[in-house]
Amino acid sequence: MEHHSESGATPWNIVKLLKWTTSYFKSHGIDSPRATAEILLAHILKLTRIDLYLRYDQPLCSDELKRFKALIKRRVKREPVAYIVGVKEFWSMDFIVTRNVLIPRPETECLVEAAISVLHRDSKQNAKDKSRRVLELGTGSGAIILALASQSTEHLFFASDRSLQAVALAKENAGRHGLDKAVDFFCGDWLAPLSDDRHRFDMIISNPPYIRTRAIGRLQPEIYKFEPIVALDGDQDGLLCLRLIIDSAYRYLNPGGSLILEIGHDQKTEVKKTIDRCGNYEKVVFKKDYSGWDRIVQMQKKS
Ligand code: GLN
C-alpha cells in the first residue's frame, strides 16, 4: 500500500482504504473482512465505525496510514481483533483484554444469564435476606463477574484467578465500570486459597478450560497462536478442571447453593456422570447456548 492510491493523484481517504483493506483481508481468508477493516481503522482514527461513514472522504496522514498498515499486518498473522484494539464487548460492556486472558465469548453470556436467573429465584425465596455471596473461579478479564455485578448491587461478589496479571486486569476492568467496590478479587488456583470452614458461598460459577489438549492445535490459529493455553487446556479429555471444580465446590457452598459451569459442546454425558458420581448435588439442569449446544450446567448442593 503506497501513500497515494493507484491513480497517483488522490491520497488515501477512508472509503478507499476500507475498500482496499476489505479485499486484502478477503484474499487472506480473514473472517468478516469489511467489519474488521472498519474496526481497525476506527481504532487508529479514534472514531466510531459510524463516524467512518460520516467522514468517508477524509484523507489520512502518513502516520495514520503507517499505523493502520501495522494493524493490518498483525491481523493477517491471525492476531485476534480484540487483542489488537485491546478491548472486547461482552454483555454490552467494554472489557480491556490482553494476551494474559481469554477473550470473552458471546456464548458465555448464557452463563451470566443462568446465574442471574438463579440469583433472582433465590432472592424471591428469601425475601428477608436477599443478599447472596457469589464466587467466580478463573475470572480472566473479569467479564463474567463484572457483568453479574453490573446487574445486581445487593449481592457480594468475589472472583479469583491463578494468574496475577489476570487479577490485575480484572481489577482494572472493575474500575472502568465503577465496580471496584462491588467485587473482591484474589489470586489462587481454583478453590485452593479458600478454607471450607470459613469461606462459604451461595453461588460458584466458572468457565474453566475444557478443550482436549490434542484438539487445541486444531482450533483456529487466532485461538491457539494467541490466547493463553492455560485458559483453554482441559487436559487429555478436556474435563480435568470441570471435574476438580465439581468434586470440591460443594464444600464451599451453603446448603441449596448453586454451582454453574460452562462446558464443551460435547461434554454433557461425561459431566453428568461426574456430578452423579460426586453425589453431593441435586436439581442438575443443562442449558443450551444460542447455537443449540449443551453449554451450561447448573446444580444445587444437596440440603
Ligand atoms: N469456548 C472457548 C473456545 O471454544 C473455550 C473456552 C474454555 O475452554 N473455557 O475457544
Image (cartoon, rainbow, N blue to C red):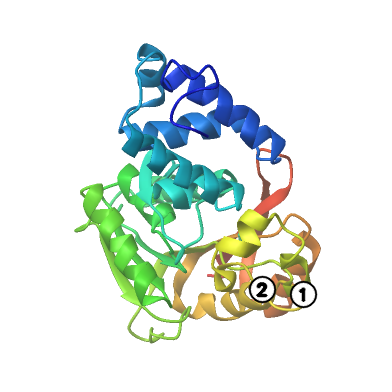
Which type of secondary structure does the marked residue at label 1 adopt?
loop
Query: Which residue shows up at 70% across the image and 73% down it?
Result: 239
Q: Residue furthest front?
A: 8
Q: Amino acid at mark 2?
A: Gly
Disc number for residue 237: 1
Left or right? Give the position of 299 relative to 82.
right
Count neighbours of disc 2 (C-alpha within 10 A) and say few if under 14, some if 14 to 19, many if 20 or more. Answer: many
Closest to the observer: 173 or 245? 173
Cβ of mark 2 under 8 Å from ligand 1: the answer is yes
Question: Where in the figure is residue 219, as x and y percent of width and height?
Answer: 72, 58
Q: Amino acid at mark 1?
A: Asp
Residue with the mark numbered 2: 234
Question: Where in the figure is residue 253, as x and y percent of width and height?
Answer: 46, 72
- Compared to residue 298, the image places residue 40 above or below, namely above
Residue 188 placement: quadrant: bottom left
Which type of secondary structure does the marked residue at label 2 adopt?
loop
Query: Which residue shows up at 60% across the image and 74% down it?
Result: 246
Closest to the observer: 81 or 139? 81
Question: Where in the figure is residue 215, as x and y percent of width and height?
Answer: 77, 66
Callouts 1 and 2 close, C-beta under 8 Å = yes
